[in-house]
Amino acid sequence: MEKSLYLKGEASEGNGVKLVFKPAFLNHLTREIMKKQVMTSEKRFESYQSALETLRELIQTAKAKDTLEQLRPEIVKRFEETHDLALETIHAYFKEQGRAPFSGSRDITVEAFNEDLIDDGEGWLDIIICRIKYTPLYPGDYLGSLSEGIVKKYFYLLENFERNFTKKING
């Protein structure tokens, strides 16, 4: 199925030019545009801060209204998104510095600890292990323990990363 794009011409009122594109070309064009839009660590950090604020508000609401049990799935979902954005921010930061590619979140976490981007490397590794245990591939109900860990410890680790990264990029 072809897609059409109409361009209005300035020379002739009401007349336009119809361009017809095949979907394969549009997909290719989209991919090329996306390649050009490389997100800097600062842009990723802005996304991270927004996600962290959403998580903060969710946790505060759960505590204030005593609805932690009902909001556990949403807390875990928002936490995972926020943690992923933190790792993406760290990865982009190291990439901008010309650091070698990393094989996974553990390597990034260790290097971030060595660079003082995070101040509790063991806690961050615990996050990774907890998230692995929470995946549907492993038996057991980890939703309760993961959401409890988020509220009691992991959220504060993410806040500390926000503080440390802000210091790092601001000089």
Image (spheres, rainbow, N blue to C red):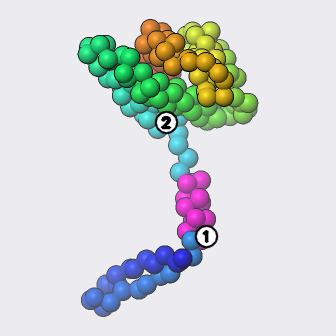
Q: What is the secondary structure assignment of the residue under circle 2?
A: helix
Residue sitting at 61 percent across and 28 percent down? Answer: 136
- Amino acid on which the number 1 mark rests in the picture: Ala
Label 2 vs label 1, nearer the camera = 1
Whether residues under marks 2 and 1 lie with C-beta atoms below 8 angstroms apart, the answer is: no
Q: Is residue 125 visible?
A: yes
In the rendered structure, the answer to whether residue 88 lies left or right of residue 144 reads right
Residue sitting at 38 percent across and 17 percent down? Answer: 69
Can you identify the residue that label 2 sits on? 44
Residue 31: say if magenta: yes
- Amino acid on which the number 2 mark rests in the picture: Arg
Say the numbered circle drawn on residue 24. Answer: 1
Q: Is residue 94 above or below residue 32?
A: above
Front one among 158 and 73: 73
Residue 78, quarter of picture: top left
Q: What is the secondary structure assignment of the residue under circle 1?
A: helix
Residue sitting at 70 percent across and 23 percent down? Answer: 107
The magenta region covers: 24-35
Residue 19: say if magenta: no
Instruction: Tell me how far mark 2 sits from mark 1, CA to CA.
Output: 29 Å
Picture coordinates of residue 70, whole percent (x, y): 36, 21
